[in-house]
Amino acid sequence: MITVTDLSLSYGERALFKNVNLKFTPGNCYGIIGANGAGKSTFLKILAGEIEHDKGEISIGKGQRIAVLKQDHFAFEQYPVLETVIMGYRKLYEISKEREVLYAKEELSEAEGMRAGELEADFAEMGGWEAEAGAGQLLSGLGLDEEDHEKLMEELDESKKVRVLLAQALFGNPDILLLDEPTNGLDLESIAWLEDFLIEFPNTVIVVSHDRHFLNTVCTHVCDIDYNKITPYSGNYDFWYQMSQILQRQAKEQLKKREDKARELKEFIQRFSSNASKSRQATSRKKVLEKLDLENVPVTSRKFPYVGFKPERDIGNNVLQTDKLNCSFEGTALLKDFSLLVNKGDKIAFVGIEHASKSALFDIIAGEKKPETGEFSWGQTTSVSYFPKENSAFFDSSLSIVDWLRQYSPDEDETYVRSFLGRMLFSGDDALKPVNVLSGGEKVRCMLSRMMLSGANVLILDEPTNHLDLEAITALNDGLVDFTGVILFNSHDHEFINSIANRIIELLPQGGMIDRMMPFDEYLKDNSVKQLRSAAYSGTNSANRNAQRLRM
């Protein structure tokens, strides 16, 4: 259990939060939410003891162990993967290393023999004999093949390192688990496995995430950082959202009443301040007006961009046809005789673990690369706008955001472009920043602005929610739901897929695919889909494991 009492933290004159009082108890999962920059990650670091706060106290139950998801992906480069996971239980790891040193000696002194006995007892009590097996199970659940378990961390790619560090945090049944964006870098299968793990986890979990489905699935409580406060709510993210909408409406109604009252008072004061018989009443109303204090009404830190895609022309019945597309990378087939017919009204989510294949397909049909063999054709009425997963080439310049976007605008007038950028949260001097220094989230908002200005009736989006906060994801989600054209997209956000897609295509190993006209949640429950997946994945160990824990 963690108890937070009168916690405050400020940076200069900017207060992140003041006088926070919270209690985190075992058996519950607490989602920490708030706008970018509100202090979510900072709050986790305070709980972990990594940074100091200005005022207040953090109390942790006696003898309880905190585990933290590490953000430095290169901190364990020279260690084997299994050993890196076991390091998550620091005391057990230190005991195992001391045992190794003692047992490496040819002879033990009497004192060393007694110490070895103590270590054996502690090692057994902490589950040392099962440590490697437990670490291996965590790694397998998160999608790492057994052959990866013995590799050095430096031999793994970035996505696998993320999974190892997550396994490290989960290892050894910690009393308190602090997770900052644990779904980043995970595919849908691994996220589902993590959801199941946390649902069954008996201790305290505190998590920061931008994944709404994840928050809805695992959270029993939500702690909202806004208005320089951290406010706890019972229930998951959807419950918090409903409550927040009600509270916002109430706040707006109260503010309107105060503004109306202030207007009445000002009118009375103006009319009668020079009237001798009414001057006392006017003076009294001045005091009431001062107490209303409209200037210090708290302002939310949440900002929602405007995302709306308006096609310049309606799309015809002929949209896209691909015929036996083939593509490979370094000897590995990404697409094999891939044929597809896209229809008017389709909003297709491409899912599954063949991530490189999805990106290769999008690059080909967007005209960014050529297939090795095969053909594709767009209908005459189509106009296409593409959001690639890797967008750095678009921002390799010192142009300001205004000048950068002007390149893609049908109206090059600066006032028009600035007005558009303002709706995407680039106002004032922000719109003059050079694009080569933008953050990941800012680049995504620029790319979405470019797509909106295109007037396209076909949108291709490769993981567009990466780097976005919950507010921007919600705005993009709503914009794509309302879009009247065709969408082809790929995402790791379950809610995003389920709320937008009316057709699911899963790319399978060896070039196969499953194609179903149904929402994502129905697809996951469909028995025929499960049978097809099981057959398709039976050829490899990793796929077998994914089929066993099927829940995309």
Image: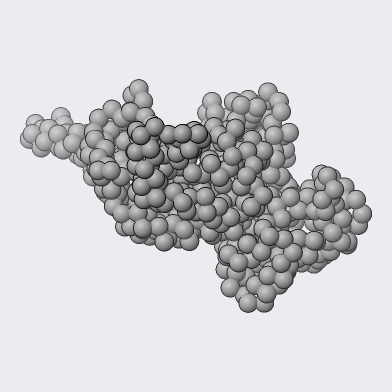
Image quadrant in which you'd find residue 287:
top left
Judging from the image, the colouring scheme is one colour
Image quadrant in which you'd find residue 402:
top right
Residue at the spot 68% in from the left edge and 74% down from the top edge: 531
Relative to the observer, which residue lies in front, 471 or 247? 471
Q: Is residue 209 left or right of residue 276?
A: right
Residue at the spot 71% in from the left edge and 55% down from the top edge: 354
Say above or below: 216 vs 502: above
Q: Position of residue 387 (x, y in %)?
A: 70, 46
Q: Position of residue 528 (x, y in %)?
A: 67, 77
Say whether residue 5 is visible. yes
User: How many discs mark residues in the rendered view?
Assistant: 0
Say above or below: 129 vs 281: below
Q: Is residue 223 left or right of residue 458?
A: left
Say whether residue 267 is visible. no
Q: Is residue 535 left or right of residue 340?
A: left
Q: Position of residue 398 (x, y in %)?
A: 68, 23
Say above or below: 411 vs 378: above
Residue at the extreme bottom? 527
Residue at the spot 34% in from the left edge and 38% down from the top edge: 114
Residue at the extreme right? 373
Q: Point out the image quarter for the C terminus.
A: bottom right
Residue at the spot 80% in from the left edge and 61% down from the top edge: 511
